Image (spheres, helix red, strand yellow):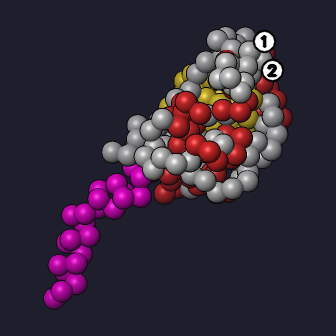
Amino acid sequence: MAYDKFTVLTSTAVPLPIENVDTDQIIPARFLKATERKGFGDNLFRDWRYNNDDTPKQDFVLNNPIYTGKILVAGKNFGSGSSREHAAWAIYDYGFRCVISSFFADIFKGNSLNVGILPVTVSEAFVDKIFKAIEADPNAQFEVNLPEQKVTILATGESEQFDINGYKKHNLMNGFDDIDYLQAMKNDILAFAEQSMY
């Protein structure tokens, strides 16, 4: 299995109300040397999280202990810039399983879906409601329901639907990457191949 199955996620959320966050800000280029998906979370938003002497920047949200959770709520146009898949690896490795925004760069969105992160696109108005809910209570809970394709602010009951490609939805719910998907159909493929020989 490529990653944890994603069905319904109930969690607090970390707010990052910044627009046009590009992949170099998510994971700076100098940390792209590794070829495995491990260890990238340590350098997620590295230049925003740490000073030059590696001390944490106190005003950055990931360094603020009142904000926790498996959901990252971001401003519009998240994941723009270069196509590095390491950006998605860093977000997953840090512990986020869902990113909510009003707009994602297409390549980042695809890379996220491939590694088990659910990028949820909702309206700017709904993202603003989520930010306000977190501001009012950093422990506010949110439910991301993949089978129903719906995000809910549990404190108010307000919710909004989101779209997702059916194939990617199936893979996320089963913890599959593209290779796992094919392996799951191995018997069907072999049976079809055998039938085609005659």
Q: Are marks 1 and 2 in contact (CB under 8 Å)?
A: yes
Residue 172 shows in this picture: no
Q: Which mark is residue 157?
A: none
Query: Which residue is denoted by mark 2 in the rendering?
Result: 132
Residue 83 shows in this picture: yes
Is residue 119 toward the left or the right of residue 196 in the image? right
Is residue 171 toward the left or the right of residue 100 in the image? left
* Quarter of the image that includes the C terminus: bottom left
Q: Secondary structure at mark 2?
A: helix
Look at label 2 and name its amino acid.
Answer: Lys
Is residue 138 toward the left or the right of residue 193 in the image? right
The residue that appears at 82% across and 40% down in the rendered structure is: 19
Q: Which mark is residue 136?
A: 1
Q: Is residue 187 magenta?
A: yes
Numbered disc total: 2
Given residues 169 and 73, the one toward you in this image is: 73
Q: Position of residue 74 (x, y in %)?
A: 73, 35
Q: Is residue 47 magenta?
A: no
The residue that appears at 64% across and 57% down in the rendered structure is: 83
Given residues 67 and 130, the one toward you in this image is: 67
Q: How far is mark 1 from mark 2, CA to CA?
A: 6 Å
| Magenta range | 176-198
The residue that appears at 29% across and 56% down in the rendered structure is: 184
The residue that appears at 80% across and 44% down in the rendered structure is: 20
Q: Position of residue 103 (x, y in %)?
A: 75, 47
